[in-house]
Image (cartoon, coloured by chain):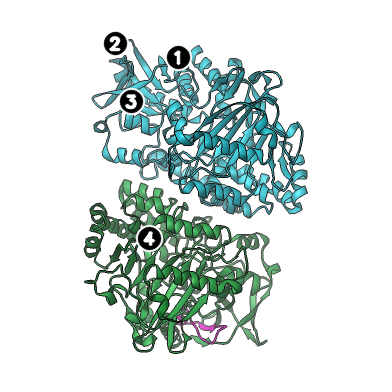
Chain colours: A green, B cyan
């Protein structure tokens, strides 16, 4: 096929924008079609209350993969990433608290007040994660191998990975094999005795998933994230101006590279002819001729909503139908008249600094597990696990002077409720979050000027995540790597000629790293050339 | 100091006895030492209540390896397996699900609940067959070490990879799912009928501290499904005279081959001389020397009780301490005056001859697990019941019956109180649960025996009451069982071997562990080093 052909990308999320950038660089003519009036997908900044802007959904970066950030030069398009330190503040109900800094020694200092043993283990744990990240980091940037006819590149990648794994030594290798399928609760217990530190770290294994810390396999998710950021508590960075500033920069960078971007351009239908893509029909009826289509939206939407399922091979359709993609996360954004005060912070602590990163609410393993239990029976957690940021501390531009924005991921909130609907219970969820926060910041309720509750249903209707899953499909042992989205089709291609996937539902998915988008671009370019 | 043996086998459970039988058949001078007055370990029949023979712990024969039955000629030694036909699941709604060994009948029964499930069930069985065929050879192999570049291991790993690649795409898809998913998620893809899914998923949690929604349980489902695969008879059934009869048959085969078996001979310590196992010391103080010691008891007892920490490498000991037992089940054995009468299908009948499974729904099963997670026995537990006396009248007086109830969950570590205080409450709770389906149960009980995880530990030496000598969780299977790097029946102490359920391929009355271990021991024996040693 000739270079210069028209490739349409469906959805203007961060992955699609990254794919568009690389396609343009590769000499293609990418056209990004975004249903909403702005690009960004799950990474956007919106005014949710007059004068108050927030990263409405995603509120921290993955982090963005280094080579992507470099190639797309995001900082050139005034996207300035802020790196809070400490990264995480974790209060406990008993008034104790932990602060996790970039500097492990400094974090250990605080941990020592709870347990000398854990303080000693902390940096050792950090090293373990760094070792694993060194080996797995590159696994995130490769295309999952073809099992039947591995390409020379597949074999080379596997060889490199194998060599990397061997470098961990016998014990290290066995540990990897043990840890992968293990429950995160067991994993952290191998290192730490303090519930608070166990909970903060184990939470990385359950964020955005339908797993509790006692669910086997949650360690695999934790390690997957550690591969992107080996810091024990993960990333807390976010751009000035909110996550929208990042996707804005990605869009500008893609445009400059030659990509075209159209907003308010919802795709109605992908036209298929003789097993190949033949065209795109927009909601307003407009037809676009194309040579190839790259879908940045989730697999279920791509195959069951955007095209005629009868054009799918039944086995493939069955596998896509079996993909678990039922969301368990809600988001609550709160406009605050002032900064909430957390008694758990020592007076001598620089309060502002301490609250500038993520705030982890979920003090014990069992607290997290009980929060998960409710969701198994179609209830949202009475005492949810919260991942909170107050971005206005480092970025006052998001709110009127002296006022603040608090943004909280809420787990667990199942897409399918047993009683009532999300529209009737939206308010109840907001109240639950406020009540939960008030236990740690008693003055918070008095400061509230407005609350925005984004339910799993909103994630489907407004953001377009089928089933309301923020990572498009569930992150679990059986839906990772060569099984993401489904076995035999984990290489960004699909059974339909000219149709590709580049979204979070492909390897490695998970968080704002842009890895899926970058990997997909590589495969698509190779395939179309 | 008494005479010298070639091999001393610690523990007279089914694996210890199988191990001894094979070693004796190979001409070795073997001594089996059993702590209790009766052989069989957890595969034992005891007359707890006069006239009633209880298969106290393990109550059905599932996976006993056909090659062992054949090679040890167990039928000649009195082994007789009687069929256990079907699984009957009463439902609170007054309905029930009754699957039988007759596939066509089961499908008709399932169609009562759902047409699509009836069709899916056929598909499902067709798909599970190749899955079992894939896993079966793994059950009789020594796991390879994936961390070495040693040609033998690489060859085995290559063999496994090729086997995987030789599967069809659909088979691979299912196999990968079985290895990684929860039994609930796995079955959700196939079926819609709640009671069908919950009853099938139950076999995915047995012997684990996991719920049906925990990833990894789909593998355990397969592990138990395998029994059903080679047809009704040899697989799922009772042994005449209770499961103890299996142990006795194996023991008789071992004796015939020349093995010596002593009961009431509790081991206190394994003798180690110059880094080599040299025999054992009994609690009586008696010292018995041997060239090889083969332990069928679990790693905690073998390495933390019978050996000194100084005799083991630190990282190995750490692995042993890390090994998860987490007993999660109890057992209630009842002597009955008459048969239980189920509301949903009153009166006696064939439905009482099979397994009776109290597993009315997925949420029921998961809530049972939730209770256990926080240190309480399930308020409404999963119960797997059998009435062997219907198939084998010899185990109860005429007209009377034995009801054996496997109960999950019963966590070894309770959040409040201890098992000695809660034993009877636990037993009552089980009977109340049964009474919800068969109200007459309370009036027909002549006597009962309640076994908590603590009792399983005390009585049968199962650490933390785990019936499989350690959890069947993914991180404790195949080359990771029991300790990564030591999944080859060998131990860091030369001439000390493991042959119990804590080794690959794990628990259930399979005997594979004892058989493979005997091969490993004989191989080492015949290698030059051991021959020299055997000589001195």
Separation (CA) of disc 4 from disc 2? 59 Å
Q: Is residue A327 left or right of residue A248?
A: right
Q: Nearer the viewer, mark 4 or mark 1?
A: 4
Residue where numbered disc 1 is placed: B259
**Disc 3 is attached to a residue of which chain?**
B
Cα–Cα gap, marks 2 and 3: 20 Å
> Where, quadrant-wise, is the N terminus of chain A in this rendering?
bottom right
Decide: few, some or many residues near mark 3? Use Cα within 10 Å; few <14, some 14-19, many ≥20.
many
Which residue: 49% across, 40% down?
B328
* Residue A62 higher or lower than B86, as above or below: below
Q: CA distance from mark 4 to mark 3?
A: 48 Å
Secondary structure, mark 3, is loop
According to the picture, the residue beneath numbered tag 2 turns out to be B1
Q: CA distance from mark 1 to mark 2?
A: 20 Å
Label 4 crowd bin: few (<14), some (14–19), many (20+), radius 10 Å? many
Q: Is residue B528 left or right of residue A381?
A: left
List the residue tagged with mark 3: B495
Residue B272 lies, with reference to residue A368, above or below; the image says above
Mark 1: which secondary structure? loop
Label 4 vs label 3, nearer the camera: 4
Q: Secondary structure at mark 2?
A: loop
């Amino acid at each position: 096929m000739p270079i210069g052909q028209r490739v349409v990308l469906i959805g203007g999320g961060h992955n699609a924008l990254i794919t568009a950038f690389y396609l343009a660089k590769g000499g293609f003519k990418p056209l990004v079609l975004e249903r909403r009036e702005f690009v960004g997908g799950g990474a956007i900044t919106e005014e949710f209350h007059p004068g108050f802007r927030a990263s409405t959904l995603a509120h921290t970066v993955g982090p963005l993969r280094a080579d992507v950030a470099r190639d797309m030069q995001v900082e050139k398009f005034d996207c300035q990433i802020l790196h809070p330190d400490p990264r995480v503040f974790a209060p406990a109900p008993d008034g104790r608290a932990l602060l996790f800094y970039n500097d492990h020694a400094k974090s250990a200092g605080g941990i020592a007040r709870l347990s000398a043993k854990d303080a000693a283990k902390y940096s050792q744990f950090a090293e373990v994660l760094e070792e694993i990240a060194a080996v797995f980091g590159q696994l995130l940037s490769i295309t999952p191998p073809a099992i039947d006819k591995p390409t020379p590149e597949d074999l080379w990648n596997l060889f490199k990975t194998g060599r990397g794994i061997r470098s961990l030594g016998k014990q290290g290798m066995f540990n990897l094999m043990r840890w992968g399928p293990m429950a995160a609760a067991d994993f952290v217990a191998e290192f730490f005795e303090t519930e608070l530190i166990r909970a903060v770290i184990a939470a990385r294994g359950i964020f955005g998933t339908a797993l509790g810390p006692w669910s086997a396999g949650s360690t695999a998710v934790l390690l997957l994230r550690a591969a992107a950021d080996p810091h024990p508590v993960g990333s807390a960075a976010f751009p000035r101006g909110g996550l929208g500033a990042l996707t804005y920069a990605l869009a500008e960078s893609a445009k400059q590279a030659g990509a075209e971007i159209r907003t308010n351009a919802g795709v109605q239908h992908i036209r298929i002819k003789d097993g190949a893509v033949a065209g795109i029909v927009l909601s307003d009826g407009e037809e676009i001729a194309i040579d190839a289509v790259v879908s940045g939206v989730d697999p279920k939407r791509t195959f069951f909503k955007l095209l005629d399922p009868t054009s799918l091979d039944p086995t493939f359709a069955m596998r896509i139908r079996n993909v678990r993609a039922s969301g368990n996360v809600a988001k609550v954004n709160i406009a605050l008249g002032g900064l909430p005060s957390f008694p758990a912070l020592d007076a001598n602590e620089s309060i502002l600094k301490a609250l500038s990163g993520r705030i982890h609410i979920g003090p014990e393993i069992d607290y997290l597990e009980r929060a998960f239990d409710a969701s198994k029976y179609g209830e949202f957690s009475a005492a949810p696990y919260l991942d909170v940021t107050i971005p206005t501390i480092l970025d006052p531009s998001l709110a009127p002077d002296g006022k603040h924005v608090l943004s909280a991921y809420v787990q667990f909130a199942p897409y399918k409720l047993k009683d009532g609907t999300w529209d009737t219970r939206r308010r109840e969820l907001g109240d639950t979050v406020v009540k939960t926060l008030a236990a740690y910041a008693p003055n918070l309720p008095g400061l509230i000027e407005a609350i925005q509750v984004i339910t799993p249903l909103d994630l489907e209707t407004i953001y377009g995540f089928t089933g309301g899953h923020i990572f498009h499909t569930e992150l679990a042992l059986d839906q990772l790597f060569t099984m993401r989205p489904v076995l035999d089709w984990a290489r960004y291609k699909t059974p339909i000629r000219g149709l590709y996937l580049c979204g979070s539902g492909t390897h490695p998915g998970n968080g704002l790293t842009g890895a899926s988008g970058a990997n997909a671009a590589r495969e698509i370019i190779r395939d179309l050339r | 100091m008494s005479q010298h043996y070639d091999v001393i086998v610690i523990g007279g459970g089914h694996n210890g006895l199988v191990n001894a039988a094979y070693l004796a058949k190979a001409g070795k001078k073997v001594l089996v030492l059993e702590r209790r007055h009766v052989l069989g370990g957890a595969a034992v029949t005891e007359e707890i209540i006069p006239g009633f023979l209880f298969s106290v712990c393990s109550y059905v024969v599932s996976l006993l390896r056909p090659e062992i039955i054949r090679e040890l000629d167990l039928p000649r030694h009195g082994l007789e397996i009687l069929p256990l036909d079907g699984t009957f699941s009463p439902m609170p709604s007054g309905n029930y699900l009754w699957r039988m060994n007759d596939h066509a009948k089961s499908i008709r029964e399932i169609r009562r609940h759902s047409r699509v499930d009836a069709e899916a069930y056929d598909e499902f069985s067709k798909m599970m067959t190749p899955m079992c065929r894939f896993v079966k050879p793994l059950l009789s192999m020594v796991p390879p070490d994936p961390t070495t570049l040693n040609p033998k291991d690489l060859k085995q790993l290559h063999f496994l990879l090729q086997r995987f690649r030789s599967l069809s795409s659909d088979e691979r898809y299912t196999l990968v799912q079985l290895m990684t998913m929860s039994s609930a998620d796995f079955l959700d893809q196939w079926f819609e009928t709640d009671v069908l899914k919950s009853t099938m998923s139950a076999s995915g949690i047995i012997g684990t501290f996991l719920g049906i929604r925990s990833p990894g349980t789909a593998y355990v489902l397969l592990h138990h499904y395998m029994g059903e695969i080679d047809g009704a008879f040899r697989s799922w059934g009772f042994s005449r005279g209770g499961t103890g009869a299996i142990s006795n048959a194996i023991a008789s085969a071992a004796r015939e081959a020349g093995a010596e078996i002593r009961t009431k001979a509790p081991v206190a310590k394994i003798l180690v001389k110059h880094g080599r196992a040299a025999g054992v010391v009994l609690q009586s103080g008696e010292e018995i020397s041997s060239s090889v010691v083969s332990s069928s008891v679990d790693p905690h007892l073998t390495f933390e009780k019978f050996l000194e920490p100084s005799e083991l490498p630190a990282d190995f000991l750490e692995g042993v301490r890390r090994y998860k037992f987490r007993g999660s089940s109890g057992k209630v054995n009842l002597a009955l005056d008459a048969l239980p009468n189920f509301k949903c299908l009153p009166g006696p009948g064939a439905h009482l001859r099979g397994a009776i499974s109290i597993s009315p729904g997925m949420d029921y099963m998961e809530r049972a697990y939730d209770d256990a997670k926080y240190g309480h026995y399930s308020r409404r537990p999963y119960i797997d019941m059998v009435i062997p006396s219907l198939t084998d009248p010899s185990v109860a007086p005429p007209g009377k019956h034995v009801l054996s109830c496997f109960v999950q969950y019963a966590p070894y570590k309770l959040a409040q109180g201890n098992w000695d205080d809660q034993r009877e409450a636990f037993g009552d709770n089980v009977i109340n649960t049964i009474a919800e389906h068969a109200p007459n149960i309370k009036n027909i009980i002549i006597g009962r025996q309640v076994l908590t995880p603590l009792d399983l530990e005390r009585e049968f030496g199962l650490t933390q009451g785990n019936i499989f000598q350690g959890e069947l969780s993914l991180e404790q299977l195949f080359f990771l069982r029991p300790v990564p790097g030591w999944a080859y029946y060998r131990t860091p102490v030369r001439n000390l071997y493991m042959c119990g359920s804590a080794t690959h391929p794990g628990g259930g009355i399979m005997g594979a562990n004892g058989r493979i271990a005997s091969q490993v021991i004989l191989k080492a024996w015949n290698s030059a080093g051991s021959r020299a040693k055997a000589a001195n």
